[in-house]
Amino acid sequence: MAIPTGAVVVALALFGLFCAFQGKNPFAVFAAINKAAFGSWYSFQNTLVRAAPLMLTALCTALPARLGLVIIGNEGALVVGGLSATAAGLACATAPVAVVISVMTLAGMVGGGLWITVCGALYYQRGVNETISSLLMNYIAIAVLNHLVNGPMRDPSSLNKPSSFPIPDDKMLPAMGDSNVHYGLVFGLVACVIAWALMEHATFGFKVRMIGGNIRAARMSGLPVARLGLITCFLAGAAAGIAGMIEVAAVHGRANESLAAGYGYAGILVAFVARYRGLPIILVATLLGGILASGGILQRQFKLPDATILVFQGLVFLVILFSDSLYGKFKFFKEREA
Amino acid sequence: MTSESIGWWGVVLGILAGAVRGGTPFLLVSLGECLTEKSGKINLGLEGTLLMGAMSAYAVSYKTGSPWAGVAAAGATGALMGALHALLVSRPKVNDIAAGIAMLIFGTGCAFFLSKPYIQPSAPQLPAVALGGWSQVAQVQAALRISPLFFLGVAVAFALQWFFRATRWGMHVRAVGDSPAAARAMGISVGRTRFLAIMAGSALGGIGGAHLTLFYPGAWTEAISSGQGLMAVALVIFARWNPVQCLWASLLFGGAQAVGPSLQAVGISTGYYLWNASPYILTLLVMVLTCSRKRTLVGAPGALGSPS
């Protein structure tokens, strides 16, 4: 843990310098972020609401990464998952709420799952670079979203922001107890725990890690490399698809361009910092959720544009990457082999 | 609508004009990526570089009043981003792709952050080279107003071709990309060659960004690049790492981008949003058709993407 923690500290210091360069007191900025993210139960709820989709989109990068595939189509899978969930939810909107939510979840999983499976299939069939194909599919997904909410799925009453017809209020994913946190958080937590159990403690995960470790050895020992790869891609996409579903069913209530809010891209960073493991993803997603939640404060109080958060994400990413090359350099930092 | 006077020819003309106008950033970025990949490293972060180039070109052109200073600034910013990427990937255990994603997010973030003051004002634009004086038709004249950076791109394409084939340095770059060990044995510094190739490639990417803000579309918006830097990476594979073929591929992609808007100009707006996806779908198709699991691609640098 020493190196990732150190890297985050260095990234924070660099971000502080960046703020100072912009003429803002970095300590005041940090204090504001902390207050807006974790300062009170009210603000922490806000953080958790943002952490839920991050946990799910992070899995979209984390699961295939264990196979050695770099998939960054999280945003696209989220959008497609949200769209399919909306379509399915509207189709059965008269059913009881539990049925509607289950159908939406399934539809989101299938939509997002198939979307990423395409990238996997292109890789295993044709050797198409999965990073580039999944990233291109993000743009295609957003074009499909725009096409559908401006055309076939459009609610004529949505004038300023073309949207689909809304999911009825009483069929939406409710908040837990008397808090503001919706049940999407449970989906995120459960998915991360399942991913952790599956990848670290089940035969399936062992096979996947074997492929990631040495694909030739895996082939020699008779593992169905492509099939395992496609299943993993499906699970990855399904996780991001659920993120799209909860954004529709718990937050927006309808499909529109707000779906592509950057949770997919932030999820890449979460997966990366958490070293692609299920349980650390929960922690990292909560931290980043807090930082996302503080974006509004930074804008109002410090007049820092919302891209500040993106700069910070990029800095963390760069520093962590750089820190990778330090492994094994110092005895002090020697880590146990995972 | 003036375009109705020439009817369906307007669509064809629109696509052809778009091929040159929209193809220019593709051309410059793909040439940059081509140079980078020839040295054996992949730079997925050119999308971020493109945005940084676009932003700095616009800002400097606005501040100084000279669009050419903007182009120079874009090139310099690109080179700086390239230096950062090169520094990262030269470290042991750092994967090119991960570094690319990091640079993509970082570059995008910085460009969006620093561009806030430049959304409103309009910066001086690059002068167009008008080749349409012979025609009486306004649309033809408009279509033949060509960006000076397009000519720069064409020149660089042929120059790079010559550079790789006939110069000592070009051979060094190819040697480093094909077999770093052999290059090292020849006494070539692998690290320095890659550093310079990545930096020069990123500078080209930055200049590609200058075309976006200083010629077409000619203003700064956050959606200005929308993946063009990434498509350029696929385009290089399609062009088989050949600079002159990058030129033809860029024109094809630029044309694909212009299909939707050209159809809309003659009043066909069905599927307008889907047409927006056409360059991405084209890129995917091109990759599906040109890639193969069985063999290495002809022209691919031997050590591409492998840890040094």
Image (spheres, coloured by chain):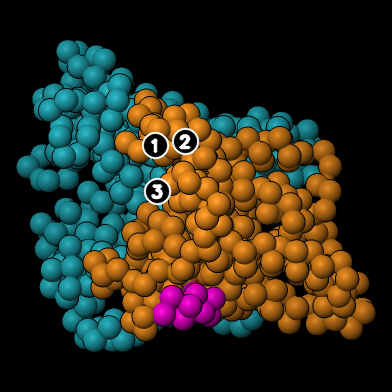
Q: Mark 1 is on which residue type?
A: Ser
What colour has chain B? orange
Q: In this view, does A219 lie to the left or right of B144?
A: right
Q: Which of A11 and A328 is in front in this view?
A: A11
Give the residue pinned by disc 3.
A264
Label the magenta part by its dominant secondary structure: helix
- Residue A299 in percent (x, y) is at 18, 68
Give the residue pinned by disc 1.
B3
Mark 1 vs 3: CB contact within 8 A: no
What range is drawn magenta here? B66-77
Precedes in sequence: disc 2 or disc 1: 1
Q: Is residue B194 left or right of residue B8?
A: right
What colour has chain A? cyan
- Label 2, label 1: how far apart the Cα atoms are: 6 Å
Marks counted in the figure total 3
A74 lies above or below A163: below
Q: Nearer the viewer, residue B58 or A68?
A: B58
For residue A5, say whether it is visible: no
Q: Residue at x 33, y 82 (%)?
A: B63
Q: Is mark 3 on a helix, strand or loop?
A: helix
For residue B65, say whether it is visible: yes
Q: Mark 2 is on which residue type?
A: Gly
Q: Which chain carries label 3?
A: A
Mark 2 vs 1: CB contact within 8 A: yes
- Give the numbered dot on residue B10: 2
| Residue A275 on the magenta span | no
Q: Is residue A249 left or right of residue A268?
A: left
Q: Mark 1 lies on which chain?
A: B
Q: Mark 2 lies on which chain?
A: B
